[in-house]
Image (spheres, rainbow, N blue to C red):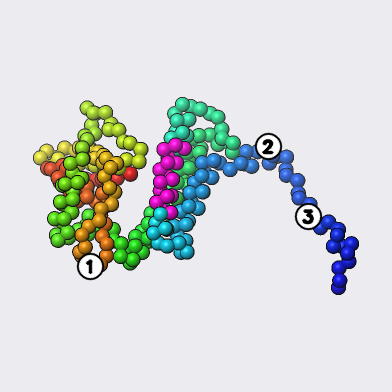
Amino acid sequence: MEARVDDLLAPAAVAATPPTPVDLLKSPDRFFNRELSWLSFNQRVLDEAENPRHPLLERLRFLSISANNLDEFFMVRVAGLKALVREGVRVLSQDGLSAGQQLVKVSAAANDLMADQQRIWRAMRAELASAGLVLLDAKDITATDRPAIEEIFLSRIFPVLTPLAIDPAHPFPFIPNLGFSLALKLRRLSDGKRLYALVPVPTQVDRFWELPPGGRRKHARRFFALESFLILFLDRLFPGCEVEARACSG
């Protein structure tokens, strides 16, 4: 059936758009929360780390970008919300949430995001090992590897470390933004007294160190993280103490 010329020239029928309810126009529900929207954006960045169309190291870069973004988010956005709560500011966001309510929602969303980051990193670490890039932990170091690792620690890392005591007699040590620190709970072997300490690491120290070839995979490139150096040689930093708990930041 041929179309008539009049039909072709006539404006296309447009479906009528239902009017927006007046209640919605006056409701904060019509807005996205700025902080939660930003976390959703960073989730989309993280999703690229699982995109099989990207090369493996590009996927690792996306994972790293999402982690750096999250650090900045907590330094700026979350710190701002906490300041509002501390000062008792009751102004609501555009979507009708107080600073305290936003912190609750942000915490839940950020926890989910960090869980995804850790899951992706565990899977990616195995892929990197299959590709010949192996990241070793302190428990993976053999007696053959230890002399080379100890030489790196004693000559390049140990001289710049300044362990700090945490007790009522000292103000809590300053932890710089994006700095790397190791927090420790210790027990002194001589009298059983519990101690707390912080080991801040200067930013000019490399986070990852390449080790000489060795181990079962002779042709793989092996790397050792800064925190693993500290964990492996804690006895050099705190002789006569037993480590009961530890945590890394950075």
- Callout in the foreground (3, 1): 1
Q: Residue at x 21, y 40 (%)?
A: 160
Badge 3 or badge 1: first in the primary sequence: 3
| Residue occupied by mark 1 | 218
Q: Residue at x 21, y 37 (%)?
A: 162
- Callout in the foreground (2, 1): 1
The kind of residue on which mark 3 rests is Ala
Residue at mark 2 to residue at mark 1: CA–CA distance: 67 Å
Q: Residue furthest bottom?
A: 1
Residue 237 horizontal/vertical position (percent): 16, 42
Residue 242 painted magenta: no
The kind of residue on which mark 1 rests is Lys
Marks counted in the figure total: 3
Residue 157 horizontal/vertical position (percent): 20, 45
Residue at mark 3 to residue at mark 2: CA–CA distance: 26 Å
Q: Residue at x 16, y 37 (%)?
A: 193
Residue 206 horizontal/vertical position (percent): 27, 47
| Secondary structure character of the magenta stretch overall | helix
Magenta residue span: 62-77
SS of the residue at dot 2? loop
Q: Residue at x 44, y 45 (%)?
A: 69
- Callout in the foreground (3, 2): 3
Badge 3 or badge 2: first in the primary sequence: 3
Q: Is 198 placed above or below 150 here?
A: above
From the viewer's perspective, is 30 left or right of 160? right
From the viewer's perspective, is 83 left or right of 247? right
| Residue occupied by mark 3 | 15
Residue 66 painted magenta: yes
SS of the residue at dot 3? loop
| Residue occupied by mark 2 | 26
Residue at mark 3 to residue at mark 1: CA–CA distance: 68 Å
